[in-house]
Image (tube, rainbow, N blue to C red):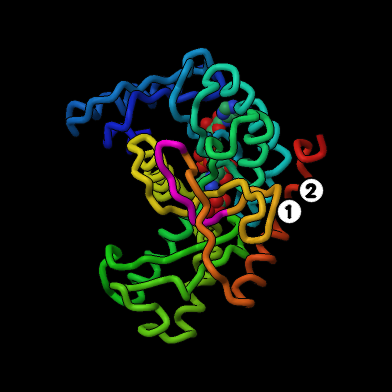
Amino acid sequence: ALMLAQKELGDIILVDIPSQTNPTKGKALDMLEAGPVQRFNASITGTSSYEDIQDADLVLITAGMPRKPGMSRDDLVAVNEKIMIEVSQNIKTYAPESYIIVLSNPVDAMTFVCFKTTGFPKNRVIGQSGVLDTARFNTFVAQELGVSIEDISGFVLGGHGDDMVPLVRYSYAGGIPLEKILPPDRIEAIVERTRKGGGEIVNLLGQGSAYYAPAASMVEMAEAILKDKKRILPSIAYLEGEYGYSNIYLGVPTILGGNGIESVIEIPLTADEKKALDQSVKSVQNVMSILETAKA
Ligand SMILES: NC(=O)c1ccc[n+]([C@@H]2O[C@H](COP(=O)([O-])OP(=O)(O)OC[C@H]3O[C@@H](n4cnc5c(N)ncnc54)[C@H](O)[C@@H]3O)[C@@H](O)[C@H]2O)c1
Ligand SMILES: O=C(O)C[C@H](O)C(=O)O
């Protein structure tokens, strides 16, 4: 929320479940009071009443349990599906024309739950994983090469799990294919670290999960939509035949603009890349098979 306000992307309403004290209102007020110092103009309010989101343009869903060290994101499916259904029903009631970006884990499955529960068109229900996973990949490549992150452009495809598919063949440093400037063993180490990047932070924190980089990733997607930027960004999108998959939400390159996901970009994959993507799809489908929403 603070990052959104700093960029003056709109007026912001934080919604959380009620509690005896008022931490949501407190956080909102604290952020608002940073405005005069940092010179941003944005209204920021906290509430536990969904009526207050009436006719919101964009809703970012971060409600739900984070994992603890030793857990997989998929272990959160049952508890977070219930939360996602409740949140989605309220969005459907109070902000029926909104665009939605889902963050809650396991995010591919939770985006599917939100899509089914709201009944919104697929271009308006979007999940976040690839911007974050790519940011992690880019961080590690820049560190390895000792160069600016500004010149690194990685590419991550697939589900937001440990078998996500960082596509080395489509990754560059200053326009130079990564494979030309890093030895295979260093690239493999970066791919592995990216796949486990969420878990690395969960273990370091001991409680809760990554925070700043996921927020920055949501804000980049929000900005693309609100300003109709037509960015090429990875999103979790509903697939209907693209890449050979259907009835699934999966991380793929998309064009994000004023109409949400305006299109899914299909790129050619080698047999090995497709095999890796198939594996990632299988993992997402395994989680989806547990969903009450998928059974209904
Ligand atoms: N997709 C990603 O890349 C990514 C990145 C980071 C975190 N996450 C996920 O986002 C979720 C939130 O993570 P966090 O670190 O902010 O957790 P957190 O515990 O700090 O915050 C979760 C919030 O959800 C609220 N909540 C619980 N039940 C609710 C309900 N029924 N309605 C509305 N709000 C409710 C809680 O009160 C709490 O404020 C987790 O599932 C986490 O795994 C995903
Ligand atoms: O790893 C997690 O549990 C949180 C999030 O999905 C992340 O990648 O940081």
Q: Which residue is mark 1?
A: 285
Q: State the image coordinates of residue 185 (x, y, percent, origin top left).
A: 49, 84
Q: Residue at x 28, y 72 (%)?
A: 174
Q: Residue at x 65, y 29 (%)?
A: 119
Main SS, magenta region, reads: strand
How packed mark 1 is, by other alpha carbons closer than 10 Å (few <14, some 14-19, many 20 or more), is: some
Q: Which residue is mark 2?
A: 289
Q: Nearer the viewer, residue 130 or 185?
A: 130
**Placement of 239 over or under 176, stated as above or below:** above
Amino acid at dot 1: Gln
Magenta stretch in the rendered image: 251-259
Q: CA distance from mark 1 to mark 2?
A: 6 Å
Can residue 134 be spotted in the picture?
yes
Amino acid at dot 2: Ser
Location of the N terminus (image quadrant): top left
**Placement of 67 over or under 13, stated as above or below:** below
Q: Nearer the viewer, residue 244 or 218?
A: 244
